[in-house]
Amino acid sequence: MVGAMPSGRRQVKSGFAQECSVLREEKSVKARLQFPFEGVPAAGEATEVAPGVLWLRMPLPYALNHINTWAIRDGAGWAVVDTGVNTSEAVAAWRAVLAGPFGGLPITRVICTHMHPDHVGMAGWLTRRFRCSLLMTRLEYLTCRVLAADTGREAPEEALSFYRAAGWNEESLQNYRARFGGFGRDIHALPESMERLTDGQSLQIGEQTWQVVVGNGHSPEHACLYCPALKLFISGDQVLPRISSNVSVFPSEPLADPLGDWIRSITKIRTTVPDDVLVLPSHNEPFRGLHARLDALDRGHHVALERLLSRLDEPRLVVDTFVALFARKIEGGSGLLGMATGEAIAHLNHLLRREQITVRRDENGLAWYERVADELS
């Protein structure tokens, strides 16, 4: 697949959102969120968030050093949602969970919200150990399989042209070449088959029914789970309380509009899931205040788009727009460069779809973005 993920993802992952977020956060909104649990579960331990629902944490080798996973009592065992990456630390944590909080009961099925390594990395290990099924949406499963197949490949020329057009220098391109093909290294080999999740599907887990709510933008077909009876919403990376998920364009689909998908998903979740749920996110802590957080994310992206538009009063390269979007300087040799570039292009592509800017390529293949005349008046 043509450079579908930025280089250096293992080193930075969602830490990018924490260290270099688009300028869209509002402290007042965060202050209105309620975090009902004190402390977080240690690796190998669990906190019960509702009857038959456990909060687990798995260690990550990234700047963002944890992922929350969730266990739901499922008859004579446990269904788990998301898994952590394939590391010796994660294996040790899962073994401790199995012997401790799970009481020796088996895992009945593994549900992955989406295909990023911190969510799907241990899925193959768990499903093979317990001979159980993997449940994912089709696009997430197939995309993960394709990206994993890139492991060890050389960076394709199309991907290099994509980042060169954005304004990367030769040193940054060389760093990309060196890091390309690392996606699959954090993933235990996926099962050869899966059970497909679809938007609106009702999923019976133990005594409760969970509704699949699909969002887009952060990943192709991200599955969230909503349980009306327990008033729980497992949001994955689609809604996080303290950081904003990366929304990026990659070389495999250079004209994509993931930001448009993300904004539409915010509206969809707001109308599908009521505000009185306890949100169980993949990072940070469970919280209440879903609609306030969704409104802040939506408003923040529109503020970011306006800031970006004001920056395009003259032709700019992608790398020239970082100052309008990010709270810190993006260094050319930094592992954050790929994620910053992908997110900047997502905002630029959205403005292109709205016909508020134009883009032209010069004789060197560089892409120059500029506001249209009506936007300047």
Image (cartoon, rainbow, N blue to C red):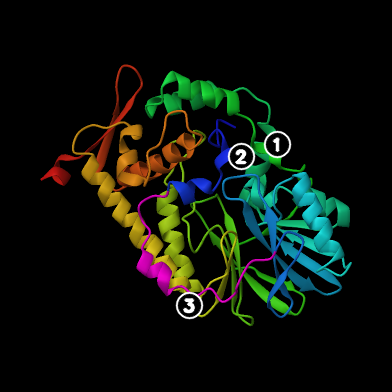
Residue designated by label 2: 10
Placement of 251 over or under 353, stated as above or below: above
Q: Which residue range is magenta in the image? A: 21-41
For the C terminus, give its image quadrant.
top left
List the single residue furthest toward the left: 377
The amino acid on which the numbered mark 1 sits, given as a three-letter code, is Arg
Residue designated by label 1: 185
Q: Position of residue 17 (x, y in %)?
A: 47, 50
Sort mark 3 into few (<14), some (14-19) or many (20+) by Cα contacts within 10 Å.
some
For the N terminus, give its image quadrant.
top right
What residue is rendered at 83% in x and 68% in y? 102
- Give the distance between the C-alpha atoms of the residues marked 3 and 2, in whole angstroms: 34 Å
What residue is rendered at 71% in x and 55% in y? 83
Placement of 95 over or under 292, stated as above or below: above
Q: Is 137 within the magenta? A: no
Q: Is mark 2 on a helix, strand or loop?
A: helix
Residue designated by label 3: 275
Compared across the picture, whether 141 is left or right of 207 comes to left
Q: Is mark 3 on a helix, strand or loop?
A: loop
Question: Which image quarter: residue 3?
Answer: top right
Q: Which of 115 and 341 is in front in this view?
A: 341
Residue 302 in view here: yes
Residue 193 in view here: no
List the single residue furthest toward the front: 39
Magenta segment, principal secondary structure?
A: loop
